[in-house]
Each structure stands twice: as C-alpha cells, then as structure tokens.
Amino acid sequence: MSLQLMTYLVVGFTFVVYIGIAVWSRASTTGDFYVAGKGVHPIANGMATAADWMSAASFISMAGLIAFLGYDGSVYLMGWTGGYVLLALLLAPYLRKYGKFTVPAFIGDRYYSKSARIVAVICLIFISFTYVAGQMRGVGIVFSRFLEVDILTGLLIGMGIVFIYAVLGGMKGITYTQVAQYCVLIFAYTVPAVFISFQLTGNPLPQLGLGSQVSGESVYMLERLNQVIQDLGFGAYTDGSKSMIDVFCITLALMVGTAGLPHVIVRFFTVPKVSDARRSAGWALLFIAILYTTAPAVGAMARLNLVETIWPGGSPETAALAYDERPDWFRTWEQTGLLGFEDKNGDGRIQYYNDANPDYAPIAEARGWEGNELSVDRDIIVLANPEIANLPDWVIALIAAGGIAAALSTAAGLLLVISSAVSHDLVKSIFVPNMSDKGELMTGRIAAAVAICVAGYLGYNPPGFVAQVVAFAFGLAAASLFPAIIMGIFSTRINREGAIAGMLSGLLFTFGYILYFKGVFFEPLAENVPENWLFGISPEGIGVVGMLLNFGVAFVVSRLTAAPPAHIREMIEDIRVPRGAGGAHSH
C-alpha cells in the first residue's frame, strides 16, 4: 500500500470518528453549546483540555523551535507548561465557582461595567483570531504535504470538518471530539519519538534517550549534536544566547499570556462541580506533560538526523550530500515550498552551515562555499522527522493525522470562544438583552460559521506579520486580560475605573512597543537589537512590563476613585471562600 493511500485511510478514519462524535453529541440548548451541559467526566475533560491546550504550535512548531534554537527554545516549554499550572491554580476554580463561562462576562459583572466587558471582548477576539490563524496555517501545511493537495483545498476540507463539529455540536460536540483528538495526537507524537530514540540511543523512552549515549559509541547524544552543529558554525545546542532577564520575561509573558487565553478557561465549566474542575485540571496536566516532556528529545534528535543526512560523515571535513542524490523525503518536502535548495557555488552539493557567523566565514571561503544553500521551515521538523529517520509508512501517516488533530482541536475551541463572545457577551448581554434561548443558539452558530470563514482566509492569506504577532497575542493577553481577572478575584478594592484604565494602558504600551521594534503593519521604527530594548527585554517578553503597568495603573486609579459597591465586594469574598466554610458538613 502506498504512503499516500495509507495517509488517506488513516486521516479519513479519524475524520469519520470526529464527525460521528459531533452528530452523536450535537447541542440542543445554549447550555450544551457553550458548556456541554456541565456533564463531562473529569478524566474526559482533562483529555479535552489537553487537546485544546496543545495546539498546532505545541505539536508542529514547538519541537521545531527547540530543534533550531536549542537552549533558547526552553522558554516555550517552561512558559506554556507554567501557564497551564497558573491557570489551573489561580484562575479556573474561582471562575468556575462564580459561574460565568466567558472571561468578558466575569469582567463585565465584577467591574459592574458594560465598557469593561466590551474592552474584554475586543481583546479576546483579537487574541483568538491571531492564534487561530496559526492553527489554520498548520492545517494547510499538513494537508499540502500528506494529502498532496494544494493549501486552499486542504484548508477548505479542514474548515468543513470544524464547521460540522463546532457549529452543530457546540461545546458538547467539541469536548468529545477533542477526547478522540487527544488520543490521536499523543499517539502520533510519541510513537515516532520512541522509534527514533531507540534508533539513536537504544533507549525507547525519548525523555531518557535525550541524556543517553549514542548506540555503539561512548559519546552522549547531546555532545554529538553540539559537536556536529559547532563544526558548521552554529552555537552549541546546549548554550543560550539570551540574557537572564529576557529569558525570565519571555517565559513569564508566555505563562501569564496563555493563562489568560479564554478557550481553555471555558473548559472548567463543562464539569458538574468545582471539585471536578480541580480534578480535571490535574488530569490535563498529566496528559499535557506526556507531550511536553517528549518535545525536547524530538527537537534534538530531529536536528541531529537532519544535519547527518546533509553531512553523511557528520562533519564538514567530509563531502556534503550531492543534490541529485537527495533522499525521497527531501524531494517531497521541496514540493511544498517549505524546504529549498539554491546552489550558490555551483558544485551540486548541499552546503548547510551558519553563514551569519563571521568567525566561520574564512573557513567556509577556504572550502569554496559561498553561503548556506539550504532553507528549512521550522514547522516541518516534527512532520518530516519520521521520514528523515526512515520509519515505516504507517508511522508517517499517523503523524499526519496527529498534526491535523492538534490544529483542528485548538481551532475549534478558539472559534467557539469567538462565537460565544459575539453571541453571549455582545449581542445578548449588550444589544438584545431579551433574546430567547433559541435565538441566542442560532446567533452563536452564525458567529461560529463567520469566524470559521475568517480563520480560513487568514490561514490561506496569512498576513505578513502572523509569525511576528504570535508573541503579540501572548503579550496582549498578559498585559490586558490576565491582571483584570487576577485583581477581580483577589482584590475587593479594584474598581471599574481602575480596571478599564489598567487594561487600556497595559494594552497600548505592549502594542506600541511591539509596533516600534517589530513593525507589525509597516517597517519597524527602531532596530530590533538588545541594545535598543527597554531593560534588555525583547518584544516577545514585553507583555510582562505591560502587565506590571496594568497592575500599577489599576491600583492607583482605584485608590483615587470611589470603592466598588458593597454587593460587588461581597460577591468577591464569596468567590474566594469555599462553600460550607465555617459550617460543619455543608455541601
């Protein structure tokens, strides 16, 4: 059976399962559509939360970032994992007890202000669309390579699948579909990792293989990787180039930014009780840890396999791979445009080295090299890894299904958040307060359908700045929504004026800083180099300063204006005190 036919069968089977689940569990009420009727088991909810959390960024991009950034890539691991812990401990149980299943609803009620609610909706929609554009790009990449269709066709298929289970099934359909998607994506991620770890080190556990010796040799795998990439002018894989303050700020921005992302918070409303929300948070952390502890090994092993494919002897002292003798995986990925070769010195061989390193230039010149001739999109590393390692076709087909599952699961969660923000937080709560349950459900479905079309467009025509504003999405969430939620839960003194002033100041500062250095919509106004950064903090980490500014402004303005009404202060106290506290056996 050919690889293409096997891929069609495996991916097609998963699609049938997803659609079947969506039809079986379709939403009939707004409760089903928004929070799955609050009837999901904590373990199932833990799996669905893990699938929601682990987007195409986790499945496709994270190991690719680690593969090329090495030690510096650890900020993504620490930030995204830490963000989940922060969300599970500091936010989710309190919001679940309060009973509002959207972030704008909580902010609007807590700060007794429609203006605060509208600001929160605008932040939420911007963050969600920025994030969903990346998911749709992931869908396009996977389809274009493995189903050998163009990106537009792949996107239309993906949009059709999401439309069926998000628009019809709502949160109920999405939850049970995401349980299936978690099983697919985690199996697809770990099976190739086990094979490759065993190939390279003889140890089937990738987490241990990362620190093991190369099979049949007395050298450790990371030592070998350091040696081969330093021979090509790259920095040591296990050394970092970022300053400590920048690593700290990027990690913290990712943590608080992801903790403020709304599509995971809503997950804690789909279980029957507050105690179940805590339990499902624990299960989700376990399920997420399986992928996140495997990613560093996948990144390191993929980088080693890639370099040793181009330099069969593992060193530039030996001849590089002849372009005419390139392996099949190289040819198929070339067709997607995500892998490219340009023969700069006309020798017919693939020169892959760090031509940005001035210390390496004389060595390259002495060897007759005229620049790096290989361009590799980081997003292909995880997907191409099984092919580079010559694994069986069924493993390659499985990873295609896993990549699609990761992208679609998060895209569906984000699209539902956008639809609930529009239908519940804008239309029902502000413009048409007397809308019926049936009317709200129809508005939610229409909003989800429109959001899918916009997301598909962004996936097909990604704005030139999508890659740049991924950091912006997290910085924006960190600087706007996160402080408003935290202060709303833990402070009775922060009032309406303080919250709105804080959100706007954090938002505008972070937006302005990234615009200044990254040039999101036009050429940057200043060079994006450490010497020019405020306190040495890069645009990726500046959300932390925006967050602190938000806290500070909110605190000062609240002190200078009237305290919140008594019923709001009582409500906050009630959120923080467990039900039955002070009673003997209260439930």
Image (cartoon, helix red, strand yellow):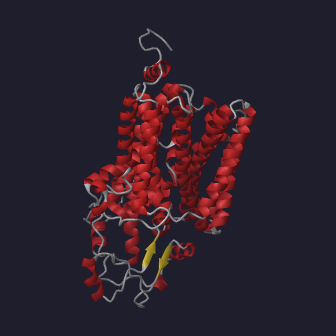
Viewer-side residue, 138 vs 320 = 138
Question: Which quadrant holds the N terminus?
Answer: bottom right
Residue 228 figure quarter: bottom left
Q: Position of residue 72 (x, y in %)?
A: 33, 58
Residue 83 figure quarter: top left
Q: Position of residue 471 (x, y in %)?
A: 43, 55
Q: Is residue 365 above or below residue 31?
A: below
Viewer-side residue, 302 vs 234 = 234
Q: Position of residue 169 (x, y in %)?
A: 69, 41
- Left or right: residue 153 versus residue 546 is right
Q: Position of residue 297 (x, y in %)?
A: 38, 57
Viewer-side residue, 508 vs 80 = 508
Total label count? 0
> Which residue is the extreme one toward the top?
584
> Which residue is the extreme one toward the bottom?
346
**Residue lying at 43% horizontally and 25% vertically, measured from the top left:** 562
Q: Is residue 33 above or below residue 573?
A: below
Viewer-side residue, 486 vs 42 = 486
**Does residue 198 appear anywhere in the picture?**
no
Q: Is residue 369 above or below residue 59?
A: below
Residue 238 figure quarter: bottom left
- Left or right: residue 216 versus residue 98 is left
